[in-house]
Amino acid sequence: MTAPSWQKVLSTLAGGRSRELYARAVLGQPLDATPKELQRLVDAGLLTPEHAVAEGLFTDVLAAAAPTPKGVDRFFRDGRIDSLPRAGQDRTALLAHLAGRLLPADMELGEPEVNRLLATVTHDIPTLRRALVDHGYLERYPDGTGYRRVTEAP
C-alpha cells in the first residue's frame, strides 16, 4: 500500500469536523461520525478501514515527500556510500567530490590516516582508496610511504 500524499492528509485535516474526529480517534474516544465522515478519514489514510488510527502514517508521508537527492548526493545513504557507481561520469564526479571533501590538499598522509578519513564514508576502504589512486585524485608514493591528494585536474 502506498502512503497517502501529504496534500490529502492536510486537506482532510483542514476541515474542522475531520480534525475533531481524528483527534477523538487518537485519544480513543467514541467517534460519533457518519459513514461519509469516516470514509473521508479512511481515504486520507488517517484511519484504517476498521476505523483505528493508522500507525506510522506521518512517518510514511514525510518519507514519501522527501526530495530525491541530486548529483553525488544520490550515492549517499545516511552520510555513507554503499558502493562506487559503475558509470564513468558518475564515478568520476563522486571520486572528485570525496577527494575534495575528505583529503587535505598539499599534505602527506600515511596509509592509516587515509584509511581513517575514508572510513568516515565507506566500509570498503581499500576499494575506495584504489579508485582514488587509479582515477588520479590520490597519489601513492612509489615506495609506499605515503599518499598526497592531487590538486590538479586528472
Image (tube, rainbow, N blue to C red):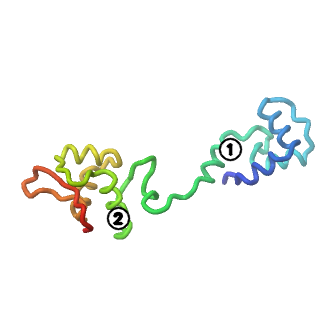
Judging by the rendered image, the residue that carries numbered circle 2 is 91
Sequence order check: which comes first, mark 1 or mark 2?
1
- What is the C-alpha distance between the residues marked 1 and 2? 37 Å
For numbered disc 1, what is the local secondary structure?
A: helix
For the view shown, which residue lies furthest in the front direction? 106
Quadrant of the snapshot with the C terminus: bottom left
Give the residue at x 75% y 38%.
Answer: 53
Q: Residue at x 30, y 56 (%)?
A: 99
**In front of the other: label 1 or label 2?**
2
Above/below status of 131 relative to 9: below
Q: Which mark is residue 123?
A: none
Relative height, residue 68 to residue 35 (above, below): below
Check disc 2: other Cα within 10 Å, few if <14, some if 14-19, many if 20+: some
| The image quarter in which residue 13 lies | top right
Q: Nearer the viewer, residue 77 or 105?
A: 105
Front residue of 63/135: it is: 135
The image shows a total of numbered marks equal to 2
Q: Report the residue marked by disc 1.
A: 57
What residue appears at the point 91 percent right and 36 percent down from the top-left corner? Answer: 32
Residue occupying the point 19% across, 55% down: 148
The three-letter amino acid code for the residue at tag 2 is Arg
